[in-house]
Amino acid sequence: MRRQAMSFVAAVRGERKPMCGAAEASEDLRVSRQCTSLLKAGLAEQKRPNQREVSVPVRFRKVLVADERYESAGVFDVNNDGVLDIVSGAYWYEGPDFKKQHHVGDVAAEGEYFDDFSTIPMDVNGDGHMDFITGGWWGNTVRWRGNPGPKGGDWPEHVIAECGNVETTRGWDVDGDGEIEIGPSTPGRPLVVYKLVTDSQGKGAGKFTAHQIWKEQGHGLGFGDITGNGRGDFVLSNGWLEAPEDPYRGEWVLRQDFHLGSASIPILVVDVDGDGVNDLIVGSAHDYGLDWWEQRLEKGGKRTWVRHSIDPYNAQYHDMQWVDIDGDGKCELVTGKRYRAHCGNDPGASDDVGTYYFKWNGESFSKQVVDYGQAREGKGVGIHFAVADLRGIGRLDIVAPGKDGLYVFYNEGT
C-alpha cells in the first residue's frame, strides 16, 4: 500500500488479509462484494433451499490488557518490528503479549469521557511510521497523532480541521482510489471528508484537503454501494446519499427512503441475504435495538426497504463490524454494548453488558455470546473497537476498549 493505510478493523499485515479476503482499507465496497460472493456460494451448497446452516460457536479467551476507560482502540505495528500492537487513548501496548505500556500523550478528560473517539491507522507524514486519526466531542476537531518512531516519546497532536462535535470517525475509500478518506460523524453539522495529500511517490505529506459532501448529518453514518453501480454512497439517519460520478465535484442526491433514529456508526452496507443487492445493518446507539434493513428492487427499478429485527432486547449498539470471525469464509456481524454511552442516561444503561457475534443462517441471524454479565463482569466494545489476527494464526481476535476496561478476546476457534 502506498501509504500503509492499515485497516482499523483488520490491521492488515502484508501477507495476511483476514477480512473475508479483503483488507479494510476499503471497508465499504470490497468487503461487501467479497462477502456477498462467499455468501452466495455457501447458500448454493445447501441441499434444501430452506435448510438452516449448522455452525459450532467460536470459543473466546478473555484477557485484561489495561484497566483504563478510553473508548477507542486500534491495532497496527507501531514500532515496525513486524508484530501488531494495540493503541488506545493515552497509551500503546507492545505486542505480542501487550503487557508493556508506552505513553502516547495526554488525552483531555471531560467527566467520564476522554476526548478520543477513534483510532484509525494512517502514515500521515509519509515517514514509514504509522500514525493515527482521532477526534472528540469537546475538542470540536478531527486530528492526527504523529508516531515519533525510534526516538520514542509522546506523539505530537496535529489538528486536521475544526469541524464541530465529533461523535466518532471512520475511514472509507470515498473516491475509489484504493486509499481511505477520513469521515467524521458530526451530528448537526455538514458531512465533510478529508483526503490525505500525497507526494509523487504516494507518501503522505502531512496535510489534508476537505471536501463537503452534504449540508448536514444526524446521528448515524455509513458508506457503501447501495445502487450496485460500483460507487460508494453515504447512509445518514434520515436517508442515503446517492454518489455522483465525481464524489468531490458532482452533486450528491438525498434519497429519504427511511429514518433510522439515533443510529450506529458505522451503519453497515452489506448484502445480508445474498440476493446481489446490499442491505443495511443498523444498531440503536442510544436505545434498544439492532436491525437489518432489506433492500428490495421492484419491477421498474423502484427501491423499497423492509426492516427486520436482529436483537430488540439489548441497547447501545454503537459500533459494529462485518468480518469472518469463525473462519468459514462468510462474514458475521460483531458488535456489543457501549457501556455507559451517555453516563447512565440511555434506555437500557443499567442492563447487563455484552459482546456478541451474529451469524446469518440463511433465514435470520443467530446470536452467539462472546461475553455477557453485570457491569464490570460482562464486557462491551466501546465506541471504536478493533478486530485483528493478533497472533498470526489465521483467526480474528477482538480488541474491546471502553469505560469498562481494555480487553482482548482471543479467538480459540470452534
Image (cartoon, rainbow, N blue to C red):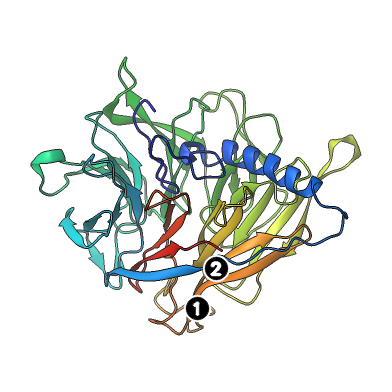
Closest to the observer: 222 or 391? 391
Query: Mark 2 to mark 1: distance in Å?
Result: 8 Å
Position of residue 19 in the picture relative to residue 304 (left or right): left
The residue sitting at 47% across, 68% down in the picture is: 60
Q: Which of the numbered marks, if any, corresponds to residue 38?
A: none
Vertical placement of 188 versus 308: above or below? above
Which residue type carries mark 1?
Tyr
Q: Write down the residue under mark 1.
A: 372
Q: Of the residues shown, which amino acid type is indicated by label 2?
A: Tyr
Q: x, y percentage for residue 89? A: 27, 58
In the figure, 282 relative to 32: above or below? Answer: below
Q: Which residue sits furthest top?
A: 200
Name the residue that disc number 2 marks.
356
Q: How crowded is mark 1: few (under 14 residues within 10 Å), some or many (20 or more)?
A: some
For the C terminus, which image quadrant?
A: bottom right
**Which of the two residues, 33 or 137, is positioned nearer the viewer here?**
33
Tell me whether the residue at label 2 lies in contact with that at label 1, contact meaning CB atoms closer than 8 angstroms: yes
Figure check: 311 above or below 319: below
Q: Can you tell which quarter of the image residue 281 is in?
A: bottom right
* Image position, residue 141 (x, y; %): 31, 48
Pinpoint residue 267: horizontal percent, then vertical percent.
58, 52
Q: Which of marks 2 and 1 is nearer the N terminus?
A: 2
Residue furthest to the right? 299
Residue 55 in view of the camera: yes
**Other residues around mark 2 within 10 Å, as few (<14) / some (14–19) / many (≥20):** some
